[in-house]
Image (spheres, rainbow, N blue to C red):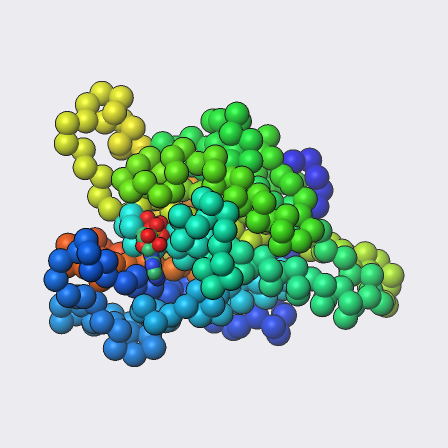
């Protein structure tokens, strides 16, 4: 954490590779109906590449993916720009939001059963494996292209879980209850969190599998603790480039954050008392605080009014404050089920997605 490279350097705003829209990119992805388990027909229908309808209500986002969309399609929508933004020096994050069982894990990593057996087929690979495959291919390309400037990249990764407002290191699960620190030099960081250097997609995948197996409860069991925890996989990408004019080496650092959020469904508090009740309140604090922040950031973008942004009110938003707002690039994949029984949670996810869409990051530069 005393590593000077970790300091957040001024971001490079003049890079032409980066799309000019600075808002949050919101993609809604609908999973198939499980005909053996779910009654009735689909109540959600895609109406165009960016719109859907549910019970007579129409919604528009940046993109709508129905069951025809492949993992590769989602990667092209969300993953490719993520890698380019990161290489251009922007902190770049993808959040998977939605109720338990809506497809967050599937989208972020791949189908849980194949993941836990570590035998994902190529087609099944979710965003994370594809993002890192692309990242290392692009790094090779850039290093070759700019060999005159001795351009070199270095990446290291960490993987953590936030459960009940406590941070656990998924790469070393003996490290529990880690604390977030902030200082001028290092920015915001988690004290004592394991960071591993990675040189290839294989290295990253090994960490992903190791970390996922250290989650509180296997990702497959629905309504288990795992559906109430957030995971944050971070890859810090550092580059060093020697100027051909003045010979001075310049460093650039940016993060990729892949955030698999806790299930967004309302927690049932029936019968909970004492510690259990407190825990139930805490469990979704990070998620509800993310929702609050989204509302505030959207309001600031719409009204242009300055406002205090309470990043510190939860672990997740404190940890990711440098990736929420400002010049950071943010994409949300909001996962929904088409089943009638999920209707009210689906509406709630779509409303969340709509508020996220209203954020324009440019409007809040220097607000942090
Ligand atoms: P979550 O992480 O939101 O709790 P999962 O990703 O585990 O949900 O998805 C629930 C189930 O639905 C899993 O069996 C998963 O494989 C399946 N599933 C999710 N999305 C899709 C999809 N787009 N196509 C096929 N199956 C899917």
Q: Is residue 145 left or right of residue 118?
A: right
Could you say which is closer to the camera, residue 116 or residue 198? 116
Res. 153 visible in picture: yes
Judge whether 75 appears above or below 93 on screen: below
Horizontal relation, residue 187 to residue 325: left or right: right
The residue shown at (57%, 70%) is 18
- Looking at the image, in which quadrant does ligand 1 appear? bottom left
In this view, 20 is above or below 358:
below
Pick the front one: 143 or 329: 143
Residue located farthest toward the top when viewing the structure as drawn: 274
Residue closest to the eye, 113 or 281: 113
Residue 302 vs residue 270: left or right? Answer: right
* Residue 13, placed above or below residue 317: below
Residue at image point 72% right, 63% down: 140
Q: Residue at x 41, y 68 (%)?
A: 70
Q: Please name whichever residue, 284 or 359, is drawn nearer the observer in this view of the structure.
A: 284
Q: Position of residue 32 (x, y in %)?
A: 27, 63
Q: Quadrant of residue 132?
A: bottom right
Image x and y of residue 39, in percent: 13, 58
Total labels: the figure holds: 0
Spot occupied by residue 126 in the image (x, y as percentages of width and height): 46, 58
Q: Return the x and y of residue 252 as percentages of the image width and height.
A: 69, 55
């Amino acid at each position: 954490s005393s590593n000077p490279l970790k300091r957040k350097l001024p971001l490079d705003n003049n890079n032409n590779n980066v799309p000019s829209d600075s808002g949050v990119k919101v993609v809604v992805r609908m999973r198939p109906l499980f005909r053996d388990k779910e009654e009735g027909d689909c109540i959600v229908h895609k109406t165009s590449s960016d719109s859907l309808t549910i019970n007579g209500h129409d919604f528009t986002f940046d993109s709508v993916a129905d069951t025809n969309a492949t993992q590769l399609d989602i990667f092209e929508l969300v993953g490719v720009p993520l890698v380019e933004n990161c290489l251009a020096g922007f902190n770049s994050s993808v959040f998977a939001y939605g109720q338990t069982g809506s497809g967050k894990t599937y989208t972020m990593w791949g189908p849980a059963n194949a993941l836990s057996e570590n035998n994902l087929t190529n087609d099944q690979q979710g965003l994370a494996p594809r993002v890192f495959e692309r990242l290392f291919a692009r790094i090779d390309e850039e290093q070759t292209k700019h060999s005159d400037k001795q351009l070199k990249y270095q990446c290291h990764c960490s993987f953590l879980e936030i459960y009940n407002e406590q941070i656990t290191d998924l790469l070393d699960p003996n490290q529990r209850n880690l604390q977030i620190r902030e200082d001028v030099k290092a920015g915001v960081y988690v004290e004592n969190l394991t960071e591993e250097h990675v040189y290839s997609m294989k290295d990253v995948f090994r960490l992903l599998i190791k970390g996922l197996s250290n989650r509180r409860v296997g990702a497959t069991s629905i309504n288990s603790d795992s559906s109430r925890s957030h995971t944050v996989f971070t890859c810090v990408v550092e580059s060093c480039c020697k100027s051909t004019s003045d010979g001075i080496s310049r460093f650039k650092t940016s993060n990729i954050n892949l955030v698999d959020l806790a299930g967004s469904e309302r927690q049932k508090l029936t019968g909970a008392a004492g510690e259990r009740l407190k825990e139930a309140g805490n469990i979704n604090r990070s998620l509800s605080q993310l929702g609050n922040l989204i509302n505030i950031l959207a309001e600031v973008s719409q009204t242009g009014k300055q406002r205090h942004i309470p990043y510190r009110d939860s672990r997740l938003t404190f940890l990711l404050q440098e990736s929420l707002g400002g010049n950071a690039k943010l994409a949300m994949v909001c996962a929904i089920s088409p089943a009638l029984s999920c209707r009210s949670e689906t509406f709630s996810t779509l409303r969340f997605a709509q508020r996220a869409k209203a954020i324009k990051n440019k409007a809040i530069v220097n607000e942090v």
